[in-house]
Image (cartoon, rainbow, N blue to C red):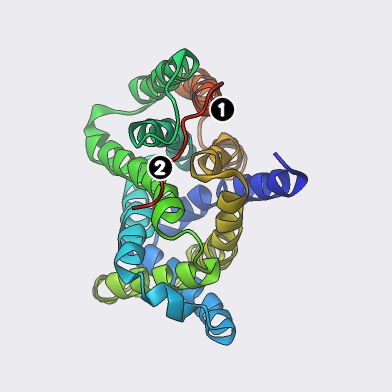
Amino acid sequence: MSKRGWLLFLGMGVIWGIPYAMIRVAVRDFDPVVVAFGRTFLGALVLLPIALWTKVLTPVLKHWRWVLVYTLVEITGPWLLIGNAETTLTSSTVGLLIAAVPLIAIVLTTRLGHERLDVRRVLGLVIGFAGVAALVGLDIDVSNAGALVAIAVSVVGYAVGPVIIDRKLAGLPPIGVVTASLIIAAALYLPFAVWNAPAHYPAGATWSVVGLGLICTALAFVLFFALIGEVGPSRATVITYVNPAVALLIGVSLLHEPLTAGMAIGFPLVILGSVLGTARARSAVREPAPA
């Protein structure tokens, strides 16, 4: 990986490790759909003037169907579902479960014929999913099944999103795609956010939403598209090697969340499995041309 790739990788690992704590703080006082709307609205508000000034929205509109699909799987669904999950699960637990994204991504890319599933990757998948099983089995009460399903759907969405970017939206201006996606997501959330609007706006929750919108959305997506262009879609998801460590550190040190046996066992297994699973195959399969 180039120096630029490493900088983007580390930056994204930190920036997308922070949101779990911010979401946890925000959903204590705001409905999850309000948090998701505030995040997308602020992100769109920052990026829209840039997109209009640079005239990058027009080419994106020609691909509006795939932009809509991308928005649903990468933004609208996951951000609402993760917010709902964090009303019962700790931010540390959610951050560690999201670390399974590279495992799902490698399954998808091998099924699509982009990569070869060799013995090393199979071993990585087995180890990684064993880590997820340890985390879920030791830390999460079965009564939280709804939260687990929400995170599972979000993990799949996060894995599919980069593939859509690479296969269907490649070559489009990143700012245009991000801005259009945030506008669509905010519009979808809007009626539900209005219905669940809070009566009061506590400082902690309010600033968490602001941080989610400006740093973890507007800035983060621009860097994420650049990272995909630098290292490819499946390896771009490897930022989740760093994300859970940041989420765990913040959750334990600032939110006083417990450091559990499930985390101690599951986290290293998930990371080891992801490293093995996303390692470049010795003889890569040639990617088919986009349909």
Q: Is residue 198 visible?
A: no
Residue 226 sits in quarter = bottom right
**Type of amino acid at the residue the image marks with label 2:** Pro
Residue denoted by label 1? 280
Kind of residue at badge 1:
Arg
Percent position of residue 256, x then y: 55, 39
- Between 26 and 40, the residue placed more toward the observer is 40
Around disc 2, counting alpha carbons within 10 Å, would you say few (fewer than 14), some (14 to 19), or many (20 or more)? Answer: few
Q: Quadrant of residue 107?
A: top left
Q: Is the residue marked by circle 1 packed among few (<14), some (14-19), or many (20+) residues within 10 Å? A: some
Q: CA distance from mark 1 to mark 2?
A: 17 Å
Q: Element type at marker 2?
A: loop
Q: Quadrant of the N terminus?
A: top right
Helix, strand or loop for disc 1: loop
As displayed, is residue 41 above or below residue 165? below
For label 2, the residue is 288
| In-front residue for pair 181/170 | 170
Q: Depth-wise, is mark 1 or mark 2 nearer the camera?
A: 2
